[in-house]
Image (cartoon, helix red, strand yellow):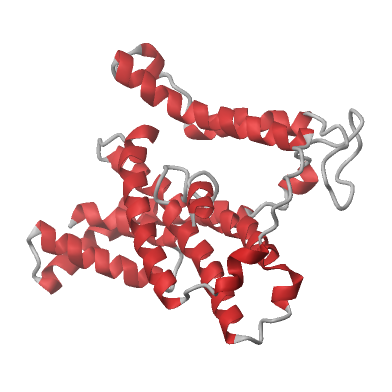
Amino acid sequence: MCNPIVMSMWVTNTGSAYILTPIVLKSFGAERQQKLDDPEEQRSLMGSLLSVAYACNTGGMGTLVGTGSNLVAVRYLRELGVHIDFVQWLVVGVPASLSVVCVCYVVLYMRFKPVNTMTKEVDTRAPKRWSFGEKVVAASFVFTASLWVFPAFYTLAHGSHHDFVQHKLLAGVSVLIGTFPMFIISDRGDSPRSVPVGPPVGGGHRVLPWSVAKNADWGIVMLVGGGLAIGSQMKETGLADVLAETFVKSTGIHDIWVLTFVTTMLTIFVTEITSNTATTSIMDSGIPRC
């Protein structure tokens, strides 16, 4: 569960699961997959896949960019005058994420204890050398993450009122700067692509051609934007105030800690049947009015 939790801190939860699930299936090998009629093998595979799902969801709490819900919450906090940067979230998010994933690991291990033969079929061959395209992607990732983290460390050293801190790059701009080289640099033809993508350039193809980028899950972007739009309109039209007042009057709850507990339980229930990001947008627009 270490790989999923680390990856989902930087890649979306869904994207991390998409990447790691085939790797888990591949780790079982063809011979073991033919034995899935065996209850022991079924239990091992189920536990492995669930561990990826749980770790990806949990890891998203660790960083600001781990999931859209975090960005939505930070936006509403900023409107209330509370500013949280990347490192401040990291300090709280990573310990919380690790605590939850440890509990998940214990539960999954007790429920889906792996069979003894699981560690005997691990491929111990030396890993393949990185292609040039893979090196470019890794460098872009490190550079983008550095742009996210550096301003916060600069603030610790020079104070929050320094001119550089006041004019720092937004997280979205950092992503554009970090990913731009992948659209123009050639992979030198050594990337393991199953089919050609885009016109050839520089002896190969671009590391990230538009034919690949346009197939990204843009629905997630629309979902985040739609949730923000709904939450913003609830605030502007006064619906958030009406719902908050109605909730407080109907429940008779005035203690802040009890109110926090009830809204937390309500949010957990709602996210069982709706999107986390959309729920965050709607709930965050009304909770400050309670």
Q: Give residue 136's quadrant in the image.
A: top right
- Judge whether 81 appears above or below 122 on screen: above
Query: Front-most of 200 and 33?
Result: 33
Q: Is residue 89 visible?
A: yes
- Judge whether 234 appears above or below 138 on screen: below
Q: Residue at x 42, y 77 (%)?
A: 111
- Judge whether 59 appears above or below 168 on screen: below
Q: Residue 3 appears at what percent x and percent y?
A: 53, 51
Q: Residue 181 appears at what percent x and percent y?
A: 71, 28
Q: Is residue 238 visible?
A: no
Query: Front-most of 207 and 212?
Result: 207
Q: Residue at x 56, y 51 (%)?
A: 221
Q: Give residue 276's quadrant in the image.
A: bottom left
Relative placement, left or right, of 214 versus 155 is right
Relative placement, left or right, of 173 versus 228 is right
Q: Residue 279 appears at what percent x and percent y?
A: 39, 62
Relative placement, left or right, of 28 versus 78 is right
Query: Front-most of 55 and 108?
Result: 108
Q: Residue 71 appears at what percent x and percent y?
A: 42, 45
